[in-house]
Every structure is written in C-alpha cells, then in structure tokens.
Amino acid sequence: MSHTTDLIKNVSIAGHGQTGKTTLFEHLLFSGGVIPKAETVESGKTVGDSTPEEIERKISIHAALGHIERNGTKINFFDTPGSSDFTGDVILSFRASEFALLTMDGRAGVQIETIKLWRNLDGRKKPRGVFVTKLDNDQADFGKSLADIKEKFKVEPVAVTLPMGHGAAFKGVIDVLHEKAYLAQGESPEKEGPIPDEFKDAVAAAREKLIEAAAEGDDTLMEHYIEQGSLTPEEMKKGLIEALAENKFVPAFAGVALKNSGIIPFIDFIADVGPNPRTAKDLMFDGEGKEQTVPLDPDKPLAALVIKTAYDQFSGKLSWIKIISGKLTADTEAFNVSENKKERIGKLHVCQGKKLEEVKELFAGDIGIITKSPTLKTNDTIAAADGGLNFLHLRLPEPVHSVAVNATAKKDDDKLGEFLVRAAEEDKTFRYHFNAETHETVISGMGELQINIILDKIKTNQKIELETHVPKVAYRETIGKKAGAEYTHKKQTGGHGQYGKVLLEIAPLPRGENYQFVNAIFGGAIPKNYIPGVEKGVVEGMAHGTMAHYPVVDVEVKIVDGKYHPVDSSELSFKLAARNAFRDAMRQANPTLLEPIMTLAVFVEEKYLGDVMSDLSSKRGKILGQDSSGGIAEIHAEVPQAELLRYSIDLRSITSGTGSFSVTFAHYAPISGRISDDVIKAREGFKVQETEE
C-alpha cells in the first residue's frame, strides 16, 4: 500500500559509533509490528545490518531503510553508520529526511561524531532531536547528557520522555506529551500505565517546558500562553508541530532500546508532531546554474532525486529515490533530466532492510526503490517531462585517505577496474581514477576502514589478488628567475629537411597562474603560421621539467626572435626547437620543486590536543588556529600532502580511534634541501616518452 504525502514522515537515525542506532532501528520495527522479534547486533540477524561485511564486523557500513505505520501514518526510518568512514550514507539520509534523531550514549554524552553531525544539520537548518540510550547502565545520566548538549551546542533540549530511574533502578520512561508511563518489559513491547507519584513533579516541570516550546511555534499561541499561563492539548500539539518544523526546539527522548523502552512514546511523537514532508524544501539549479529552493509539492508534476545506488545479488541494481513532487508510477516512462533522455521505470518497491515490497506508485515525500534500471545513477533527477531543472547533488565531503592499487595478475586489471567503478557508484565518497602522471590507479575514501572493506569484498567475491601501496605525490616544477635560450633545430634527411630557430625568454608567474604564452615576434622573423608550433613545443617542454620530470607551472614564456627557411621550415621544426629552447632556458632560471600543500581540519578530544599538534609540527605542518568547546578541539593547519598520505592511520593511533579530520587542496609551495634531493632521487630512472610527429 502506498501512502499519500500528508501520511508520510521520514526520520534519519544517526550518531557516534556504538550509541545503539541499529538496536534502536530494530526495536522501532519490532514495536511497529513489522518484525516478529527484535534481534541483537551480535546475532548477525538485524534488519539494519544485513550484508556479510556488516554481520562479520558487527558495525553498520550501509544505510538501511525500513518503515512502520502508526495511526495511519507511514514512518520511514534510516539506520545509518556511525563511523566517519561511511558518512556518505548519513548525508544521503539527511537529504531524504525531514527529521534527524541523534543517538547519544547516556554514559558518554556528546562525542566527536555528534558534533560533526550537529554542524551538518545546522548547515541544512534541519529539525533534529536526541535519544539518550543505555540508561540502564550505572554510569548513564539523562540529565547530564542534556546538560552536555546545552553546553556544547548552546541550545536547551526539551524532554519529551523522562526516565523512571537510572542504572539498575531503571524501570521505563514517562511520555510527557501524552502524560503516560511506559514500563520496560524486556523482550516484550513496553506496557502503558499511570505515572508513579514520585515522578509527577518532574513530569509537571518537563511539561511546562514542552508547553513553552509549543508557544514558540506560533504568535497567537504565545499570546494565549501569556494570557492563560498554559495551552490546551490541541494548541500544544499545533504549536509543537510548527515549532519543530522550523527547528525552534530540540526534543529529547530517554530509553533503553535493548529492553524495548522509550520506543512507543518516540513513535507516537513522530506520528503526531514529526515534520510533514510538505514542510521540507529541496535545492535545484535554475536555468543559469544558480541554486533555488523548491518546496515539496504533491500537486506538481513528478520530480525526484536518485539518492543511492546499491547492488543486491538477488535483486540486482537498486536505485533509491526520494520523490520531491507529484508521484512516480511503476511501469511508466519518465525523463532523466541529468542525462537528457527518456527513462523506463520498471518495478517500484519499498523495503524493510534488504526485503523488498512491491508497490504501484510512490507519492511526494516518500522514499522507494527502482529495480534493475540499467542507466539510473546516484544524483540523477527524474521528471515527468524534459525541460525540468536538476536537483542539487548530494553535498559529500572530499576523500581524506588514498591508496594506489593494482591486480597482482595483469590479466585481472580490467576486471578490477570494473568493480572499482561499481564501488564508486555505490558509495559516492569513494573515488577511483587512473593518474596518468604517476601511472597509478588511485582509490580514495573517507578512511582506511572504508577502503579495506571495499578491497576485501573484491578479493573475496571476485577472487582477484591485489597489491596496494602509498600513492605517489604529484609534485610540480617552476622557476625562480628570468632566463633566455636560443635553439636551432636542423635536420637534413634527403629531400626537404627540417629547420627552425627560436629565441625564448621565460619569467616566473605568481603561484597558481600556471602558464602564459606571449608572441613578441616583430618583422616576420617567424611567420605567423609557425607560432602555434612554437607554443605546442613550449607546452610539451612544460610537461616534464628538468629537475625530476614533473610538470612545470607558473611560467610566462615569450617568443622574441627566430629564423626560418623558406623550404625546410615547418610547424614540427618550430615545435621541436621551442621544446628544447624552453628546457635550456629553464635550466638557467633557478628551477625549483613545488609540493602540494593541504588545508587540514582535525577534530579531537582536548586531552589529545598537545599530541596532535606536536605530530603536525613533525610533519612540517603550519598551525593556523584552534577552537575548543566542551572538551572537543578543532585544529586548523596547512600540511604538505606527502606528510598526510597515512594520516588517517596516524590520527587513529594518537587518539585511540576517536579523532577525525577533513582535508582539501590549498596550494603548491617550494621545497629545497634534503627533501628536494629525496624527491629527485625517487624519480631516477623515470623515462620521458616523447615522439616526433
């Protein structure tokens, strides 16, 4: 059965690793009546962790999607990975959801991934809530967890549920909104009952804060609240819906998912108060390539975004799709705006983890799966007809960890490439390319764990033996001063010979300006039709410098004089003359090696700050600044790329696996001395392949 827009809610469950996301997801499906028993992560039978690598490692690697129905409302839940190595699936779930629920371990409070996720949600202005888990542990504290959120994010969470006891005394939760108590029943669904007298004062105080949050949602409600000192249940619900949709408050929930506790009150809150897809907006590119906001609208023609691609051994290729407007119908034709061609839509499904359920149509706001489409890919926009606008692509972070890889047996290279392309389509934070400059196949991702899992899967499933090593750095060469050179290319081979003479002057350009060619020939010393040959020769000369055969950048080249022969000159003659003249000039222009410098942002617990900064200094890093808040430090630095090739491994070692970082290219900078000598030595034996036309 398909649900219309007003009867759909979409929720992403995200959080730091080991905070109980998959366990919560499992018990939501159990309490929602769609699975007969809630399995444990250790059993390897959960709906959320269904792939062999997830079952073996007992962690979530891919986003899982499931749904329940409550009071006629369909609630889609995403279970997302906790490791930053798999952040791509978290981001796609945020894009497709109107509400994010961040899980927090009641013992640990706010952790590094919590902070990064919160910032991502801030950038999206996305409504969110927190679910404090594992409150049956003696070290867990609901109140301290909420205080930690207030300190670190400068927002005061509003408790929608309260725990009845902590640690061994934990008995269940109280639903503040609906004023009911729910006793934990272990493996059975929680049992509704009256609120015990000992908690009534705490509930009254929490309800007052919930009413205040509701009043914030509407000016008229605020007036009623000020005049009457309270709101009716109907007014309270209306205000909470509006306030949450506008991200004006953060609801907080308590529970122990493993004991089915806190589950039903959360489901009821989402069904009653959770943001409706109509409140959401998406981003499209207009006709001029600028971003524009598009409301989710069931009454407009079809528009949808492919948010994920997966491959299942039984069902084949799966294209996950979020419907933004209109409806998508099975066995029809739509238009792929991204590819500018018609698209045949086959069967449509919704899912419970890897179990597919066929449907005839999907309405705006819903999330489903198109099976076996040979051409659909992640980020494609599907519309009712051509002329539609493209949705903005998923905003994914740049990879931070790279490895060069090749098949041990050369005959397997093509097969390896085929499966790397597929892996890059399934996870858009994973990149694969052949670096013609270093002659390496380089794969990049968010961390060592992500890359190892992908390579292990290829080794196991495809029986391909692989070799990996640290990728080579793409150095550059430049010059430090002006110089000039003259070169005559002369060759007699019988019949027409080859003749061309050029005089070049070269000069440094500011860093990042790459290359400039100036024709300063006067009086016809070189005919105009040979000047393109001169420039081709210069460009070929710049392809391999004179120090270590790296490409040359940031140079102005001026052709100032030359000589030609009316019979023997040709464009080829002047190309070869210019190539050699450029290299002769470069040798006299104080040639210098350049290395890529990266901008680094590192997130660590403050106790590791000194060790991390010391390590960055040892890596020739330049610290640009740091910020600390609530025990978490953010360090900004510029570091040579050569020092960061294994940084994901180094940082994990320094911070016991808790640190994370992002990295982007900044600029090239000169190197000299021993470092330069080592780079040059490493290139000994490099052969420049050049041909004469």
Image (tube, grey):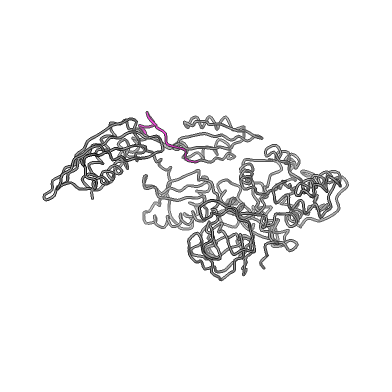
Relative image position of residue 132 (x, y in whole percent): 72, 46
Membership of 502 in magenta stretch: no
Q: Judge by depth and name the residue closer to the eye, 197 or 219.
A: 219
Q: Which residues are magenta?
A: 664-678
Considering every residue shown, the one lying at the far left of the view is: 494
Q: Is residue 669 magenta?
A: yes
Q: Residue furthest right?
A: 197
Instruction: Identify the image quadrant of the N terminus.
Output: bottom right
Residue 478's spot in the image, x, y percent? 35, 35
State whether residue 142 is above or below residue 412.
above
Residue at image location 18% in from the left, 43% down from the top: 564
The residue lying furthest to the bottom in this view is 331
Left or right placement of residue 405 versus residue 344 in this view? left
In this picture, is 520 found above or below 103?
above
Residue 625: give x, y in percent of width and height: 56, 31
Residue 54 appearing in the image: no
Q: Is residue 264 visible?
A: yes
- 220 is higher (above) or lower (below) than 501: below
Q: For this rendering, which residue is in front, 584 or 44? A: 584
| Left or right of 261, for residue 649 | left
Residue 507, image quadrant: top left
- In the image, 260 versus 488, the foreground residue is 488
Does residue 424 appear to the left or right of 215 in the view shown?
A: left
Rendering coords of residue 467 (x, y %): 42, 48
Which residue is found at the position 55% from the left and 70% from the top?
332
